[in-house]
Image: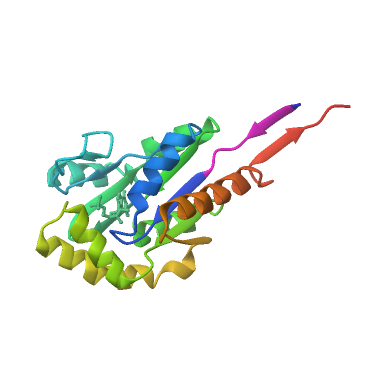
Amino acid sequence: MKETRKGMLLVISGPSGAGKGTLVAKLLDQDPSFAFSVSVTTRKKRENEIEDLHYHFISEEEYDKLLEDDAFIEHATVHGHRYGTLKSEVYARMEKGQNVLLDIDPQGARAIMEKEKDCVSVFILPPSYHELKVRLHTRNTENEEEIARRLRNAKGEIDQMGRYRYLIVNENLELAFDQLMAVVRAEKQNSIRYYPVIGE
Ligand code: 5GP
């Protein structure tokens, strides 16, 4: 049987500490049909991050130049830093039928949903605000000021969840990952992007 597939644009958002990064890493590890769209950011690199794998870490001047060159599909200021999705990370891959995963905030997700109507949007929730706070402190990647800022922003982000096609509460990582993969499996069979040609 012959089949062709159009690339899926999977947009994942969720507040810092919801476990989105872990779910994204697991999906990329287990499903080679997905490529991660590496964003640019003006935020400082964390110790555990790898340049050009997690982000392209750039200066404010470089960011301004990309804006001027119209290089972004969307861009936003999140927790006081600038982030942007590059056209070059997304469109060429999708045209080749590859699936592309974006890990972006609700402002960026909203812009993508308006431009790319067929995108698959998923919002990851923590089981509670208390748990979010505990996780942000336990992962120990931000200082107190940055943690406080991310917690302050969480409510506004969670208020946007109704815009997304799918919601997943990450109380138990295995269960949340199963739910994410169920969405991915179903959306791969969606007739907007899957064209099987059956035999005579
Ligand atoms: P972090 O600094 O923890 O890596 O990311 C902070 C927030 O920025 C997360 O919600 C993440 O999804 C979001 N983010 C990362 N890259 C982009 C991007 O290219 N565009 C937008 N709008 N948000 C992004």
Give above or below for 75 relative to 46. below
Residue 193's quadrant in the figure? top right
| 4 in the magenta segment | yes
Outermost residue on the right side: it is 200
Q: Position of residue 63 (x, y in %)?
A: 20, 45
Q: Who's the residue at 37% across and 64% down the image? A: 126
Q: Position of residue 192 (x, y in %)?
A: 65, 46
Q: Is residue 73 visible?
A: no
Front residue of 120/77: it is: 120
Q: Position of residue 74 (x, y in %)?
A: 35, 51
Front residue of 178/145: it is: 178
Q: Quadrant of the N terminus?
A: top right
Q: Position of residue 54 (x, y in %)?
A: 27, 39
| 180 in the magenta segment | no
Front residue of 200/85: it is: 200
Q: Quadrant of the C terminus?
A: top right
Q: Image check: 6 left or right of 59?
A: right
| Residue bounds of the magenta highlight | 2-8
How many numbered markers are drawn?
0
Give above or below for 99 relative to 43. above
Residue 53's quadrant in the figure? top left
Q: Image check: 196 left or right of 44?
A: right
Q: Image check: 79 left or right of 194?
A: left
Q: Who's the residue at 37% across and 35% down the image? A: 88
Q: Who's the residue at 36% across and 60% down the image? A: 14
Q: Image check: 57 left or right of 129?
A: left
Residue 130's quadrant in the figure? bottom left
Q: Who's the residue at 47% across and 56% down the image? A: 122
Front residue of 116/38: it is: 38
Question: What scheme was used to colour the molecule?
Answer: rainbow
Q: Is residue 138 visible?
A: yes
